Image (cartoon, rainbow, N blue to C red):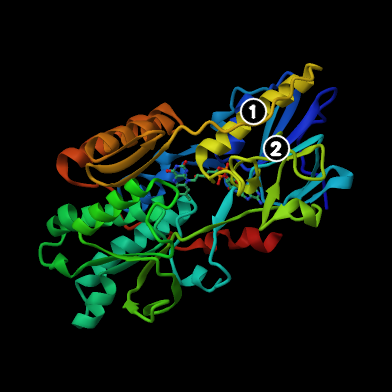
Amino acid sequence: MERIANIPDPGSKKRVVIIGGGFAGLQITKNISPEHYQVVLIDKVNFYQFQPLFYQVASGGLEPSSISYPHRKTFQKKNDFHFRMCVAEQVKPEEKRVETNIGYLDYDYLIIATGCDTNYFGNDKLKDSTFALKSVSESLLARNRILLSFEESLSAKDETQLKEILTFVIVGGGATGVELAGALADMKKSILPKDYPEMDFSKMEIHLVDASPRLLFGMSPEASQAAADTLSKRGVILHQNIPVKDYVYPYVELNTGEKIRSRNVFWVGGIRANSLAGLNDDSYFKGRLIVDNYNRVKGYSNIFCIGDTAILKTDKYPNGHPQVAQVAMQMAKRLAKNLNYEAKGSNEWRQFEYKDKGSLATIGRNAAVADLGKFKFKGRLAWWLWLLVHLLSIVGMKNRVSVFLDWVWSYLNYDVSLRLFIRPKDSSIYKHLDEKE
Ligand SMILES: Cc1cc2nc3c(=O)[nH]c(=O)nc-3n(C[C@H](O)[C@H](O)[C@H](O)COP(=O)(O)OP(=O)(O)OC[C@H]3O[C@@H](n4cnc5c(N)ncnc54)[C@H](O)[C@@H]3O)c2cc1C
């Protein structure tokens, strides 16, 4: 394997290799001092993805480009910064080396921030038969499926086929499942009847299946109840405390034996860590990397893990911290500060401590739930707060303006503007390049 080309020697500086440019990777790259470190960011895509709004891309509310931001643009002005779009494959800690699909790279410090992917709980064939929402490209695929269903519904050959086409099954009652169900319910009520006047949308069914005893399990019982009540009122059929056994087209089979006929199944029921191979077996816990209070991976002094992939067990969080954006960003900022102190020869390393700023989830138009410490509220106020927090979290001013305009338009007009079914015509144009390799 060759060394990754065109990355200069760091000279007297130390080289920090960061794998993953998501919430954690982006924050640490921004905060680490270029005076003292050469930073190499590796990601399998060349842009940052704002995952909390994937469901809006899937339901046609937002353009994928308004929730994504190119890494090269973010770090245009950062000195001694290098980005490579590639897949990190394994770590060789004895050689301080990381191997990727385009070559290897040596590091002084390695920071693993690879996040998570969809968990099919051992039933990997669900990967090919259901739609996931773990990347922008998956969200686009889901959007195409949703839009195609409505077009297909017009030429259904009988009632059974029509029902199968217009039945949407969402597996997983966390924030993404609740938000997608709410968005589909909004479409059913306000948008689809205008686009398809010849279709009777009372025949459209939205099922939300959740294995846990209550929706939004990470939030308060009050928030769970409010989500269940609102979704039920908006026509979503809830199956709570019921795991999905399997999906073999055309039936989703629930553990109770009930079968739901559908060709639109969205799997948002769990996540598993994207850990890298090559570290000691006892550094991993259920695929995540065990870290100490300084985010050092167990057994290593120069390998760190931050964000969803890391598991830090403390008295307050005996099962690890919640796998959410705030934890990822706070871990990243703490570690950047510690590494910057170290570069200045200071021993001021401080332990990571999570400051919980609360949780929000939207359930559709004018409806959301908020748990902010002792303050728990729901409805329109929570919805406005959700909009504001998410708007401010989007990377890039142009993206913020674009999301703001899309939201205002859709609020005033009961409309989403992005109902275009676009897919690649033919990817064989790249064939000659693949053959060269
Ligand atoms: C649909 C959805 C909705 C969510 N909603 C919320 C919400 O409302 N609020 C909230 O707080 N949290 C939410 N989350 C969770 C939140 O997005 C995660 O906690 C957060 O993204 C974790 O950040 P991270 O940096 O650890 O990983 P990520 O942000 O996932 O970033 C990981 C990066 O690593 C890259 N990568 C992975 N493997 C490799 C490899 N081998 N080589 C190179 N690059 C690699 C990926 O391309 C990606 O860019 C949501 C998640 C999803 C999927």
Query: Label 2 crowding class (10 Å Cα cut-off): few <14, some 14-19, many 20+?
Result: many
Does residue 190 lie above or below 4 as drawn? below
- Element at badge 1? helix
Q: Earlier in the sequence, mark 2 or mark 1?
A: 2
Q: How far across and how far down the image is residue 26, in percent? A: 58, 34
Mark 2–mark 1 contact, CB under 8 Å? yes
The answer to which of 250 and 347 lies nearer the viewer is 347
Question: Residue beneath label 2, please?
Answer: 295
Distance between the Cα atoms at labels 2 and 1? Answer: 9 Å
Q: How far across and how far down the image is residue 418, in percent? A: 29, 49
- Quadrant of res 247: bottom left
Residue type at mark 1 is Arg
Does residue 245 lie above or below 238 as drawn? below
Q: Is residue 385 visible?
A: yes
Question: Residue beneath label 1, please?
Answer: 334
Left or right? Give the position of 35 relative to 210: right
Q: How far across and how far down the image is residue 258, in percent? A: 34, 79
Taking the spot 69% from the left edge, 21% from the top edge, the residue there is 33
